[in-house]
Amino acid sequence: MKSNKLILLITLLLPVFYVQAQKTEQILIETQHTALILKAGENGRIYQSYLGERFARTADYQKLPQGQEAYITGGMEDQFQPAIRITHTDTNPSLELLYDHSEVNNPEGNVRETIIVLKDPKYPVTVKLHYQAYVQQDVIKSWTEIINGEKGKIILQDYASSMLHFNAASYWLTHFNGDWAAEMKMQETKLTSGIKEIDSKLGTRAAMYQSPLFLLSLNGQVNENNAEVIAGTLAWTGNFRFHFEIDPNNSLRVVSGINSYASAYQLAAGKTFTTPVFIFTYSAHGSGQASRNLHQWARNYSVMDGNGSRLVLLNNWETTNMHFDEEKLVSMFGDVNKIGADLFLLDDGWFGNKYPRSSDNAGLGDWQPTRTKLPHGIGNLITKAEAAGTKFGIWMEPEMVNPSSELYEKHQDWILKLPNRAENLYRNQLTLDLTNPEVKAFVLKTMDDLITKNPGLAFIKWDCNRLMTNTWSPYLKDKQSNLFVDYVHALYDIFRQLRQKHPDLPMMLCSGGGARIDYEAMKYFTEFWPSDNTDGLERVYMQWGYSMFYPSIAVAAHVTSWGKQSLKFRTEVAMMGKLGYDIDVSKMSADEVAFSKQAVGHYKRLSSTIWKGDLYRLISPYAENRAVLMYVDSTKSKAVVFNYNLNIREREVVGRVKLQGLAPEKQYQVKEINQMPGATAILPNNGATYSGELLMKIGLDLNSWHLKPLTSSVIEITDI
Ligand code: GLA
């Protein structure tokens, strides 16, 4: 009897203990070197207690202060930017989120997911915070689900993917701005009290002025090896916003997500809204380590075929523009072999009959080969390319339409434009309304037919040459403020469905250069086009910027006739990315062709180190008149150093370059490769052997007697 009473008492008390334990529990999100610690407070809300280097003893986390609320809601007592702000069906503009429970999926695996479920005590709205920790790569992905359990629609006014809090003495933000042909310019600024926002309102081609990427350095300016850095990026190809706000206590909140500008999202009863993913890595060892974390993560989890191989291509855009015919193209197939490349990429200008695409003011939307230019169609070109020993790829811009097109004549209702105002053309074109399922199906079918009917097709370049202005969807009617978001969801859905049907076809993501690159899209693409500007000098800076976030296997870099540098310089800049060509081979001298073929050969031998190795950025072009960077393979047995003298002055004094990432105990042969026929290496004692320790402590003299502007060298390092 006595024991029965005890059991009853325990049974009655248990749920209480359970709830209480739950209510104040700590939630540990850890990777190899990083910890994000959340805590449920006594008031039932959830707090961020810590983000930083992982502690050796988990017990120490118990002594952390409570911190700031992790996902602050609008309409309540907080006085700064909320992570979420909604209007309920009854127009009430407030939200309180209390901790319900958390779940952990795959706790022993490399990808561990924690889901924190929060509920409003007054309204049936549930918010789930997702944190996916990639343990080996020290990367955390976070996103939010918002579930509308109300009887009517709710309006999502703000709906961040992530909110993070920092408490440091000072904060330094590096962001990446640009324009067409001027992408990825790095700017660092000290954050001061109040707000700094990096955002986009362009709809498509959304990253043209600002890229959805940032580095945040704590307690001092960013540097490659010693700073405390967070590198963050939003996997979203539309409007984004990073909000940095310092409050009177010098605490910084970083709110990342879709830009709510003109996008108060109507969420119907019973529906769930899932935000895009915010990806970040924390590094106590500078931006170099942050980049290496992201590269490794991206290759394994977020770039299509990120650990695979890539083709060296020859594009015709810079040589022919839209002025070509079958004969011209067939003559260029032979050029692919001459330089040792693998694939011919036919660019813009091959389609349209009633309105042939002979300039950028006609044809978009009519995806039939122009009979006057290509009387035997695409299939015949593929056959001829294969006969010449090369693969064949093609350019598409399927989201767009020119007013001079049959598509425009037939389907006014498929186009994004204001019904009662003048059309605002950008590059003479308009955007199709992907929110309309019929239009979405058209775009998908256009792509699918092209690929299915041409089974030999080996590559696609998917372009997007305008941003949105004067935007209105005939389909969305009274839900216009869902347009920017629904467009992107539809686009990703097209990518996803296309990939289900054609899982292996290599595809390049392009947007008038590099105006649309993000890690959600890159799941479906094998590479991206960083910029139409292929001037070697400009590309050193741009590719440096891109390298902060993207692995070189994804960063297309072509040798073209832009820029006044030598062919060697332009080639060696392109070799630090995913090498390709867009140059008139028929105009090259015999020596230039021989050099190019040799360079492609070197590249193919070294590409696995360049694509999959660890990147060490040794000398920044932002700091000196030169740039040096190196890739080291995972076994530290092979490395490649790229050395570029930029606008360097004669007799400018530069130091030796200390290498990084090698094994100190190994012996390495150090050899400069890739000279023009008849030229000699500039590296003193070319081919000599040194220990890894010496190379890292004393370094290499890369320039001593050859300090000329716009020169370059490539050094191959092999353990012996
Ligand atoms: C964009 C691309 C270029 C080229 C042209 C074709 O500008 O960035 O590489 O494909 O379109 O119109």
Image (spheres, rainbow, N blue to C red):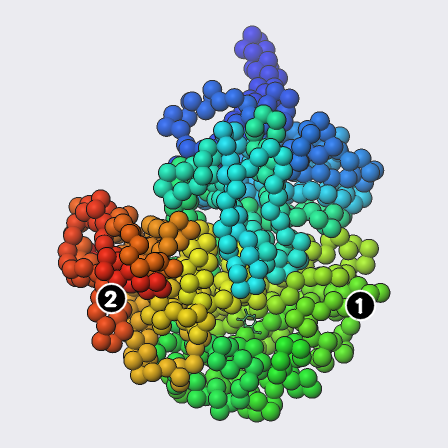
* Label 2 neighbour load within 10 Å: few <14, some 14-19, many 20+: some
Q: Which residue is mark 2?
A: 673
* Label 1 neighbour load within 10 Å: few <14, some 14-19, many 20+: few
Q: Which residue is mark 1?
A: 422
The residue carrying mark 1 has its beta carbon less than 8 Å from ligand 1: no
**Amino acid under label 1?**
Ala
Q: Taking 108 as reference, is 525 above or below it?
A: below
In the image, what residue occupies the spot 38% across and 69% down?
Answer: 565
In the image, what residue occupies the spot 38% across and 25% down?
Answer: 57
Q: Taking 206 as reference, is 73 above or below it?
A: above
**Amino acid under label 2?**
Ile
Q: Earlier in the sequence, mark 1 or mark 2?
A: 1
Q: Where residue 326 appears, x then y in whole percent? A: 51, 89
Q: Quadrant of residue 468?
A: bottom right
Q: Quadrant of ligand 1?
A: bottom right
Q: CA distance from mark 1 to mark 2?
A: 58 Å
Q: Where residue 183 appears, x then y in whole percent? A: 52, 59
From the viewer's perspective, tell me whether residue 476 is left or right of residue 17.
right
From the viewer's perspective, tell me whether residue 460 is left or right of residue 478.
left
